[in-house]
Image (tube, rainbow, N blue to C red):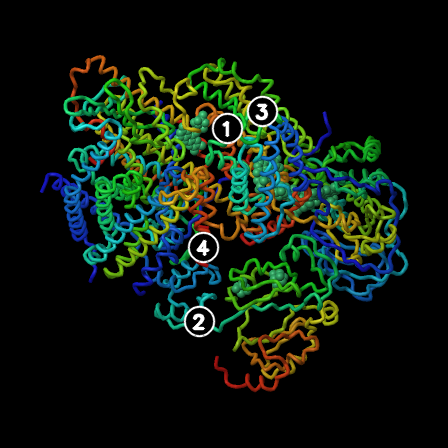
Amino acid sequence: MSSVIKHPGVVEEVKNDTVFVKILNVSACSSCHAKGACSAADMQEKIIEVKILGREFVKGQSVTIISSEAKGFLALFWGYLAPFLLVFISLVILTTYNIPEIKAGLLSLSALIPYYGALFLFKNKLRKKFTFDIQ
Amino acid sequence: MGLRTFKKGGVHPDENKFSANAPIQSADIPKQVSIPLGQHIGAPANAIVQKGDTVKVGQLIAEPNGFVSANIHSSVSGTVNKIDTVIDASGFKRPAVIIDVEGDEWLENIDRSADIIADVKLSKEEIVEKIKSSGIVGLGGATFPSHIKLTPPPGKKAEVLLINGVECEPYLTADHRIMLEKGEETVIGVSILMKGAGVSKAYIGIENNKPDAIAHLKNICKKYKGIEVVPLKVQYPQGGEKQLIDAVIRREVPSGALPIEVGAVVQNVGTAFAVYEAVQKNKPLFERVVTVTGKKLEKPSNFLVRIGTSTQQLIDAAGGLPQDTGKVVSGGPMMGKALSMLDIPVTKGSSGVLIFSESESKRRKMEPCIRCGKCVGVCPMGLEPYLLANQTEQKMWEQLETDSVMDCIECGSCMYTCPADRPLLDFIRLGKGTVGKIMRSRN
Amino acid sequence: MSITVIYTIVSLSALGVVAAVILYFVAQKFKVEEDPRIDEVEGMLPGANCGGCGFPGCRSFAENMVKANDISDMNCPVADSQTMAAIGHYLGFEVSAQDPKIAVIKCNGTCSNRNKTNNYDGASSCAIASSLYAGDTGCSFGCLGHGDCVDVCNFDAIYIDETTGLPVVNDNCVACGACIIACPKGIIELRKKGPKDRRIFVSCINKDKGAVAKKACNVACIGCMKCAKVCPFEAITIDNNLAYIDYNKCKLCRKCVSECPTNAIVEVNFVPKKQKEEIIAETEKPENS
Amino acid sequence: MAKKESSFKNMVIALFVISAVASTTLGFVYEFTKEPIAQARLSKKLNAIKMVVPPFDNDPNADMYTLPVDGGEALEAYPAKMGEELVGVAIRTYTMNGFSGLVRLMVGLSPSGDITGISVLEHKETPGLGTHMSDEWFIAQFISKNPGKNNIAVKKDGGEVDAITAATISSRAFTDAVQRAYNAYKNSADAESGATVIKQDTTQLSKGGNYE
Amino acid sequence: MEYIFIVIGAIFVNNIVLSQFLGICPFLGVSKKISTAAGMTGAVTFVMVIATMVTYIIQKTVLEKFGIGFMQTITFILIIAALVQLVEIILKKVSPALYQALGVFLPLITTNCAILGVAIMTIQKNYNLMQGVVFSFATAIGFGVALILFAGLREHLDMMNVPKGMKGVPIALVVAGLLAMAFMGFSGLV
Amino acid sequence: MSKLLNVSPSPHVAGSYSVQKIMYGVVFALMPTLAASVYFFGFGAIIVTLVSVISCVLFEFLIQKYILKSEVKIYDGSAVLTGLILAFNLPSNLPVWIIILGAFFAIAVGKMSFGGLGQNVFNPAIAGRVFLLISFPVQMTSWPKPMGFATKYVDAITGATPLGKMKEGIMNSQSVSDIMMQLPSQIDNFLGYMGGSMGEVSAIALLLGFAYMLLRKIITWHIPVTIFATVFVFQGVLNIVDSATYAPPVFHLLTGGLMLGAIFMATDMVTSPMTHKGMVIYSIGIGVITVLIRNFGAYPEGISFAILIMNAIVPIINKYAKPKRFGEVINNG
Amino acid sequence: MSNITTFTKGLLKENPVFVLLLGMCPTLGVTTTAFNGLGMGLATTFVLVMSNLVISLIKGGIPDKVRIPSFVVVIASFVTVVELAMQAYLPSLFESLGLFIPLIVVNCLVLGRAEAFASKNKALSSVVDGLGMGIGFSLALTILGAARELLGSGLMFGLKIFDNSFGMLVFVLAPGAFFVLGYLILIVNRINK
Ligand SMILES: Cc1cc2nc3c(=O)[nH]c(=O)nc-3n(C[C@H](O)[C@H](O)[C@H](O)COP(=O)(O)O)c2cc1C
Ligand SMILES: Cc1cc2nc3c(=O)[nH]c(=O)nc-3n(C[C@H](O)[C@H](O)[C@H](O)COP(=O)(O)O)c2cc1C
Ligand SMILES: Cc1cc2nc3c(=O)[nH]c(=O)nc-3n(C[C@H](O)[C@H](O)[C@H](O)COP(=O)(O)O)c2cc1C
Ligand SMILES: Cc1cc2nc3c(=O)[nH]c(=O)nc-3n(C[C@H](O)[C@H](O)[C@H](O)CO)c2cc1C
Ligand code: SF4
Ligand code: SF4
Ligand code: SF4
Ligand code: SF4
Ligand code: FES
């Protein structure tokens, strides 16, 4: 019963069996009618790669990216929750060893560096994991 | 151990089986019949007669148009008056063959004797072919061409035949009377169907409110191998094929799949009787038993009716339309169609004609949904009717699909039970239709 | 200058520079420079978000207009032609003026014109009633009167007239076409609004043979061809026992109106018959609306 | 005016200049308001002290000393003197038992330990309920009582104080804070026989605010 | 025990949205789908905790050390704004796939007053670093609880015929009020 | 045939439930409780009930007629029920104007702002009650002693509720058993001879109503029984862990609004989940939060808050606690 | 747009609180009394006007890509000025507004006007815009505060209107803020139509 997430986008480029879809990632407030008057209504363009097998897309075509909610939560985990846990746990450990808190804080923050390094190494694995489809 | 029934949901409306003790009597042959060409699920048949042709009883007058479609035979002898559109029980104008009746001349090869022929001579293939050429469709209401059910798609195999003698709809007694009066023939029909489907086991499911039929058939079945009568607890919609399969053999037909998925083939008792007549007596399907009943009706009866007879005539035969009639329904009170006028022809699918008085028939005023959850509780398919109806109103087709609207069997239990009298099924049907269209357009 | 001030300056300036560097990269990588014209165009649009243009909302329409190479087939039904012309001008296109349109109800089967043959008692919805059966009158084409069209109209432009049981379109109509999609019977059509809001059309869609249609409804089009014959501009065609007036050809001469034996042709906003002569004179003058 | 191009250099310069200007301005504003802010804080404290002790002519703030309390932050005591004579002590006391936690009071005690006045410095109690603790009638109950002799608990707990209706918790907390002040005062008086007074770093306790 | 009090306090008793009135904009803005609300909670948790840690360290090592506490507001806001962006850049560089997946799933996280508020409150409450981290984590969870509950209610109300004038913001605020009223039942829990 | 036939989609018959029947069924089920509160609290109970019911119905009428300009539906009984339940949640000596304010809040904010019957997400009566409790804590927490018709409406002699005394005692570090000595016996609690809101005092009367509603199939057992069980188990565990500070579970079952809440308020169909699975989750939540608030919170009483909080979760429960679809198992397996 | 319409639109038609729904946090958080509302409103107005002025003056010198951070620095500076000044001269108001003074920095209204108006317009109209919006904001906060104060404690700007036993505490507390704002928005919507 896993639900899907949909996101509208526009085909930016087609290369062999990969299309690059431009999506507009908007902040929470962008749905708000006052967004013109509010700075929080940020927008960013993100380019999403989608493998297409044998389907035809042309540049400029409006498409809908689909992915499963479960994948979204997994991404959330690797992107935010895991580093949070890492920092939190290292902070707990460091403080129990009576390391001064400023040092402990800086050290546990720097735990993020190897974390992101590891993510970098697993880049390709993750790429395989997080695939999208076009409706 | 209590009686078997299906696991989920269900309601028990007042049974009101007034005509249970009225023996089947033949209705008069009308002056004119109009035989609709679409009497089955699927494409309407193609007429092969023309205006002015003379036809005999049992003569083929229309041929199937596509895979899911069925032969149609004349129910009377006479001259084809015209081929035109008439409003039939579906509520829409549909093509029909209109025949002026002259005498009652049957095709010679039909065996009109009352002898019971127990011996099944035909082979499996011949049986299926015979059923097909006789234009037999499910008489339990869905009018699905029966021969298709007997030829499972490749890779599937029928294991067991279920005979639907449940007649869970209130008021209706046609199947009940067939089981009582044509028990022997019906059981032979069942064994023919078993042979046709290539199975060695058949169950006849009958609800416990028909003890005489249960006893009678049990008695007969002693003589026939592999046929067993299963009494069931009274609970609507036990007659729904998925529910019946669940109740009798404890298998759940997966969502979106056909009974054959769990090795079952379901046929109605009326169908079994029709199969008997077709196979053993060479008689195509051109008449059926119709219950005509109602609280205020003078003589609630069960008639053997030629297809194409006007409803008006049946009502007259049952004592005429009572004064304050508000609604006339073709079929059962839970699933039948309300008729917009009375000269609508009886078709293969008409199991009954119900007469409701004005006060019985008027829907109560609908109130806001109080979210009591009763509709959820009674839905035999485990759906959430309140939600489906609401989503339809809001045109949320995608959610409707994920909430399994297509599983709804349109049994009406939800709407029956709703204290707020919400037109749940009206909306669900609309949602189902729209979602169905969307799904089809996707492939 | 006290030491605090110096600390202040040093730390904040350092921070400012660091933030600048970070944000520089951010800006390098992501910040969308949205075409500012989108905002402008969106501002010019009426902002009804009705979807009548075929896009999910006014903003999306604006985006697509800005992107498009040719906007001639993009039209906001809500905006008047001046607005569209202004937008076109802004974006550097020429927009040919579109004739303003309005929804018309092509059924005149009021309670008095069309007898009921049964009482509908289901949920009040045209879609449901129409999937149930042919309808509660002898006419299986006509309006069911449950107002699905009214429900979808975002502009309060359509309402059910209690006395006739039929929907009526008023001046709020922006020709968005929502009602046309909603009507299961296909009764509503967008037609040219016409000079001075005057228009003539066949208010019937009954395709039954004449006798059947006439029996079902007093004002049904019976397909008698009289109007088609009398029309000087060949604007009227008859198909399936039903007349249709092409609004691009019709010159509003009104000859057909009086010719129709069942009064199936309706005229809107003309001065009543009595002053017929004058009006014809008037309408035949060169149009200048 | 033409927009500056977004080159790296321009961006850094722009932000640097803005930050520098802003911080300079702020630095001076801070310098300018430093005095008045300190003044405002002081006068608030002095007002509170004035309200709870008899008239004095010394600078209680300058004479402040702390009273240790077991298991909790030490209390600040502000002696009020008329001439050389000690007329009372204002004690900045607190309790954590308020409906929403911390309640801070200034309790005035006469040298003998009689309550001369109480003012509420800080609390987060519910408006309309716990806030009635600043009401005159409620505080008046405490005046001239001596927590050593009188039982200043609320009546429900067998004491002499009428609780605020529907705010027994706050009332109880109030009495708790008063009692704490008295106990601290008495303990130190007993221990030191009123002789030596330990001066301590003033800033330690008033760190509640964070803009120092 | 002290941590439990901080956690319960921040989630239920002094819920950041329902009783502290911070982060109202996303509360009203992102609360349309339960799954997005849940995702948003995760992202906010990370940002809030990291922001609290960084601002805490800056507060102690720079602001307090040099006696420029009054610069708190300006420093914190700049740090938080830069931090949010930094996380994005790093994610994008390090794992584009992950970054893309998040983009499809979540709206952007932007600075909101809850993040700044928590950073400032951590200092105001005199918490130490560990307490501050627990506090900001719990606050984020409290934010999430309110957001998810509210998203559920919104999804539900979308299906209802709310009277014309009440539709949208007014009913959302009334619901928030009733929710806040319900949450008052937790008062005194710590 | 002169009369036209009615035509509608199937089904053509309807069951015997109706909104009115259900609502008045619940009203009837509340009658023993009303009788009990009149017996214990005299005229005050009558006045409070009348004022509450009349003002609820009146406000509903006014709002439907003049503000929403919609059909007036005060006869469906839901406003009467809201009024009745609100009254049962109030002390029997509450000033009339406060009752009217509470009724106004319940109907105007709790119900009609959402569009009326069936649309609201929070239980209106509880919303009204909590609104009053927070707004007028003084008046809302002075309960008259149950003295039958000797109880005066105004200036009644007030007495605390058993739960209130329990809380008070525990705060003063008395042990539970000591406090229990000073409280009415469990039998009194069961019969209702104790201080408290009008409708909550008599457990027996409430249980009678419960039985009636079960019999009439107005509600199912799931919600009340699960709440009772949860409270019993959770409180039981606490009691075993530390019997000096945590009262025995039976005490908690019989005192305060637990019975009233579990039987009549948590079961409000509009604001409770649709499926049995959902109802069980919902009720466990109510039970747990009630026990938490009663033992650790500022309020001696917690079920109103617990129900209100769980009301907020109902949409989420409804979304995820779907009934098991027919044919689903096989599909997945 | 003339300066007059620039000014008046903030009052009702584009009221930042009731119509644009900006800066909801301080709106809800500080309006326990009319006086607090007014104080917060004026503080915000000051920041708004000053930052609008400064930004419209310096906008030419700022590269587009550091626009936002620069604005933030400017705004944050004025917020700090307000903070310091209030601590010095209005300490009790400062105490009751508490956290929300520093939070003016993130008030969408301030940054929003900087972005949407001041960065595109001349100094004078930017000031007028800031003034209009600020006064609209103050007005809204004051009304909200007054309503809550009146309902919650029977007072208005601290003056007794009716006996405080009629005060409904809820309105002083968190839920009341939501209720009153919700219904006020309803009313303003009706008026604007
Ligand atoms: C809700 C519902 C109730 C039904 N009730 C009966 C019934 O009482 N008796 C019956 O024979 N068929 C009933 N049917 C039809 C059966 O599902 C099934 O179509 C039939 O038993 C197949 O046999 P047939 O093809 O011979 O008609 C019902 C169907 C539905 C959906
Ligand atoms: C395309 C199609 C193929 C079918 N094939 C089979 C089949 O192989 N076996 C079978 O038992 N029924 C088959 N059915 C019939 C249905 O299972 C079912 O009997 C019919 O829809 C009527 O069911 P009801 O009377 O319960 O509504 C088929 C139906 C359709 C539409
Ligand atoms: C919203 C709310 C806030 C409250 N605030 C306080 C408070 O600040 N101080 C207090 O003592 N009691 C407060 N109470 C009341 C307590 O919860 C509790 O009812 C009261 O202390 C019982 O004591 P009593 O014996 O004085 O009635 C508050 C109650 C509510 C509903
Ligand atoms: C079993 C049952 C319990 C009910 N309990 C309440 C209740 O606690 N409070 C209330 O306002 N309405 C109650 N109602 C009435 C009604 O459902 C309620 O007014 C709706 O929430 C209004 O939309 C109840 C109704 C039923 C059938
Ligand atoms: S009609 Fe459909 S939704 Fe209703 S009870 Fe039957 S199966 Fe369920
Ligand atoms: S039975 Fe009717 S009132 Fe009850 S939940 Fe279903 S639709 Fe709503
Ligand atoms: S009447 Fe029809 S076309 Fe006209 S505005 Fe309404 S929905 Fe659109
Ligand atoms: S025009 Fe169509 S949609 Fe409108 S009321 Fe008639 S049938 Fe219904
Ligand atoms: S003001 Fe927007 S989140 Fe607080």
Cβ atoms at labels 2 and 4 below 8 Å apart = no
- Residue flagged by tag 2: what amino acid is it? Ser
Report which residue position mark 4 lands on: G189
Q: Nearer the viewer, mark 4 or mark 1?
A: 1
**Mark 1 Cβ inside 8 Å of ligand 3:** yes
Q: Chain of mark 3?
A: F
Q: Chain of mark 4?
A: G
Q: Which mark is residue F146?
A: 3
Does residue G146 appear anywhere in the picture?
yes
**Mark 2 Cβ inside 8 Å of ligand 7:** no
Q: Chain of mark 2?
A: C
Image side of residue E56 versus residue C172, left or right: left
Report which residue position mark 2 lands on: C81
Q: Nearer the viewer, mark 1 or mark 2?
A: 1
Q: Is residue C286 above or below residue D6?
A: below
Q: Is residue F123 above or below residue B297?
A: above
Q: CA distance from mark 4 to mark 3?
A: 49 Å
Q: Nearer the viewer, mark 4 or mark 3?
A: 3
- Residue flagged by tag 4: what amino acid is it? Asn
Q: Nearer the viewer, residue C44 or F303?
A: F303
Does residue B376 appear anywhere in the picture?
no
Q: Residue at x 32, y 53 (%)?
A: G135
Cβ atoms at labels 1 and 3 below 8 Å apart = no
Query: Residue B256 is drawn in which quadrant?
Result: top right
